[in-house]
Image (cartoon, rainbow, N blue to C red):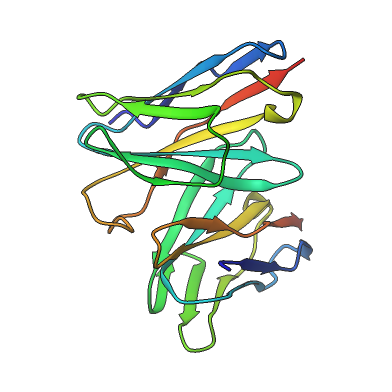
Amino acid sequence: KNEVEQSPQNLTAQEGEFITINCSYSVGISALHWLQQHPGGGIVSLFMLSSGKKKHGRLIATINIQEKHSSLHITASHPRDSAVYICAAVFNTDKLIFGTGTRLQVFP
Amino acid sequence: KAGVTQTPRYLIKTRGQQVTLSCSPISGHRSVSWYQQTPGQGLQFLFEYFSETQRNKGNFPGRFSGRQFSNSRSEMNVSTLELGDSALYLCASSFGSRLPPSYGYTFGSGTRLTVV
C-alpha cells in the first residue's frame, strides 16, 4: 500500500532556529514534492526531488532513496515561514499521495 | 504571466445538487490535476488530465468526474452532492507530458465548496 508519513504534526520555533520536517514513505517512489500552504489555502511547490539534495534560499530538501525518507530544513527561521508544509510522494504508479502536513509557527 | 486560475473561489450548494468547477492552467501547460482537501482526510488526488485524456485517477466515487478541453482548461463535476463533499478543491498545472513533471506543479488558489 502506498503511504506517506510526516512528522512532526505541529512545530513551534523561535525566530532564527533551524527547523527540520520529516517525511517517510512506504514503497518505491519516482519523486517527492515539498509544498507550502499558507492560511487561506494557497499552495506553493517548493521542491521536487528524486535524489540527493536541493537548496533554495534558506530552504534545503534532502532525500535518501534507500531509507525511503526525505527532510525539509529551514535555516534561520522567520515568522513569515509560518505555514503548513506538506510532502507528497509520486509513486511508481504515477499516483500522488500526500502526507498529513506539518503546521509550523515561528515566533519573533 | 498569469497563474493557475480557479473559478469560482467560493460556492455553496445543497445536498443532492451538482456542481462544476473550472481550472485554467498556466499558458503552455497541458497537464491539469485536481485535488480535494478536507480537515479530516487532508489532501487527496482526484484525477489528472493531459491533452484531453484522463491519465490517472484517485480513489473517489464515480460522482466525481472531470474533463479537459482542447485549450487545456479543465472542469471537474460532482453530482449528487453530499455533506462530506465540502472541501477545498485545488487544481494544479504542469508543463510537458512526463510524470512526474520535470518542473513540478503550479497550484491554483482553490475553490471552497460548502454543501448544506
* Front one among A27 and B11: A27
On the image, the x and y values in percent for residue A15 come to 72, 62
On the image, the x and y values in percent for residue A18 come to 66, 74
On the image, the x and y values in percent for residue B81 come to 65, 20
Identify which residue is drawn at 53% across, 32% down. B62
Residue A74 in view here: no
Instruction: State which quarter of the image contains the C terminus of chain B.
Output: top right
Residue furthest to the front: B62
Instruction: State which quarter of the image contains the N terminus of chain B.
Output: top left
Identify which residue is drawn at 21% across, 36% down. B51
* Front one among A65 and A27: A27
Q: Quadrant of residue B14?
A: top right
Residue A13, compared with residue B106, is above or below; it is below
* Lateral position of residue A84 relative to residue B103, left or right: right
Residue B97, compared with residue A102, is above or below; it is above
Identify which residue is drawn at 68% across, 57% down. A100
Identify which residue is drawn at 58% across, 75% down. A26
